[in-house]
Image (cartoon, rainbow, N blue to C red):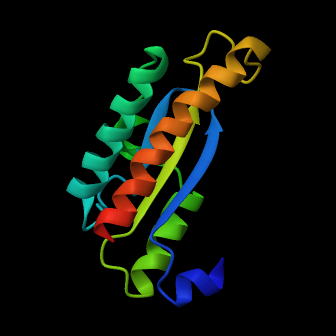
Amino acid sequence: MKQYIDDGSLKAFLTFHSYSQLIIFPYSYDYTSQAPNKAELNSVGQEMSAAIRAVHRQSYEAGQGTDLLYAAAGGSDDWAYDAMLAAGNDGPLSYTFELRDEGRYGFLLPANQIQPNCEEIDAAMHVVINYVIENK
């Protein structure tokens, strides 16, 4: 991945965790830092959330990590964001998806929810991919 960061061709970074139904963007390592393109990150995050909701009516909240959860250093989304910035990308997109569910099953999501979860996240990925193609 380093070569794609270094040559400036990496425009978006996505990582997937479970669970909480969130779309998190940088920064999460402290309560005061904000991404220079926070408004853009939030806008794309809201569009991804709407795309998810349109598939199976699941709600995902989008926002900065410290606004949605708590300070947590060492996240790959923060690392990738900073690496893209350092390479000259002035508007990188970096997100952590906290997948289904909201706590009922936690890390043991029932098998019958895996396919629907993939379908709704696929819709969100189409949003960010198309955004990169059209704007980056």
Say above or below: 101 vs 31. above
Instruction: Give the image quarter of residue 101.
Output: top right
Quadrant of residue 102 within the rendered picture: top right
Image quarter where the C terminus lies is bottom left
| Quarter of image, res 38 | bottom left
The spot of residue 100 in percent (x, y) is: 59, 23
User: Toward the viewer: 94 or 134?
Assistant: 134
From the top left corner, tell me how far across and down residue 34 is, in percent: 28, 60
In the image, is residue 47 above or below residue 113?
Answer: below
Lateral position of residue 33 relative to residue 58, left or right: left
Q: What residue sits 66% from the left and 76% below the top?
A: 1
Above or below, comparing residue 105 to residue 24 in the picture: above
- Left or right of 82: which side holds 98? right
Q: Residue at x 45, y 87 (%)?
A: 87
The image shows residue 121 at horizontal and vertical percentages of 54, 35
The percent coordinates of residue 58 (x first, y second) are 46, 18
Residue 70 makes an appearance in the image: no
Q: Residue at x 57, y 57 (%)?
A: 75
Residue at 30% from the left image edge and 78% from the top image edge? 90
Single out the residue that lies furthest toward the top.
104
Instruction: Tell me, yes or no, if residue 102 can be seen here.
Output: yes
Point out the residue furthest to the left here.
Answer: 39
User: In the image, is residue 26 above or below residue 69?
Assistant: below
